Image (cartoon, rainbow, N blue to C red):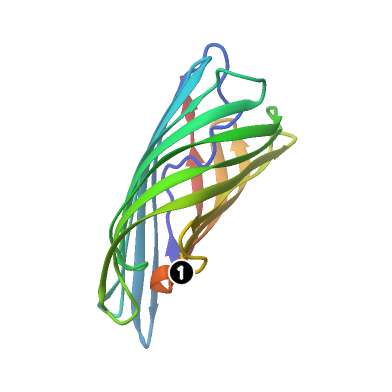
Amino acid sequence: MLIICLVCSKSALAQFNDTTHYHTAYLSSGSINKTNDGTAYLLNNAFKFNIKKKDISLNFNNNWIYGKQNGNLSNNDFSTALDFNLYKTFPHFFYWGLANYNTSYSLKINNQLLAGVGVAYNFFDSPNTYLNISNGVLFDASNLTLPNNMPDVYQTYRNSFRLQFRFSIKDRVVIDGSNFIQNSFERKSDYIIRTTTNLSFKIQKWLSLTTSLNYNRVNRTNSENLLFTYGLIVEKWF
């Protein structure tokens, strides 16, 4: 297996300051597995751009995963998201808003639009420790394919709960991640799980060796995927 990660950014938390307001990164990773039984490969590309000022932050993220196994399509998953945080009230507390569009062959999502607002609170927010929980309401307009290959076009409102964390050990080892569970208010069996956990080892201030584990499940389509990558992080703030 060969995995190459050129440029990526897993967490820009605690890297912004009074003179640093912008951050951008590009991720390109992939895997190739060739055996006597066949060949499988996976490509993962992502681009992100972040802006943070005193009272507001803006995040723009794009991700595309494409893969085949023995000549058959296994992944063709695209996601783009624009979100903002508004810091206008109490210390450590802020409002957030989100607009997210997804398509996913592996999760049987033909089209999905998620949009909503909510609140969040930072329990810890320092260069070495960050722990945040958030909750809100999302409007979900989806076109899915059910396990019996029947189309499913529907709308629902979801509760969206997130746990986000980042821990830095002597500025050399960084563990960070985001974990979402998004339940429909109408059906208990209709939920979405998204988790990302990263472990990075700093080589230089701007260069790290990293591993990343991503898990996603859409219970309505009874579909899930798991992606593990390792490579390099090159980051710049300005």
Q: Quadrant of residue 11?
A: top right
* Left or right, 183 with reference to 46: right
Coordinates of residue 37 in the picture (x, y in percent): 36, 88
Q: Quadrant of the N terminus?
A: bottom left
| Residue 188 place in picture, x, y as percent | 52, 66
Looking at the picture, does residue 133 appear above or below residue 76?
above
**Residue found 64% across the figure and 33% down from its top:** 121
Query: Residue reaching furthest right?
Result: 170
Q: 237 or 179, which lies in front?
A: 179
Query: Could you say where residue 39 lies in the image, as x and y percent from the top left?
Result: 33, 78
The residue singled out by tag 1 in the image is 219
Secondary element at tag 1: helix
Q: What residue do we see at 46% from left, 65% from top?
A: 190
Please give left or right for residue 167 compared with residue 41 in the image.
right
**Quadrant hosting residue 173:** top right
Badge 1: residue crowd in 10 Å (few <14, some 14–19, many ≥20): some
Task: Judge from the rendering whether residue 74 lies leftward or rightward of residue 94; answer left or right.
Answer: left
Write the residue at 34% across / 79% down: 147
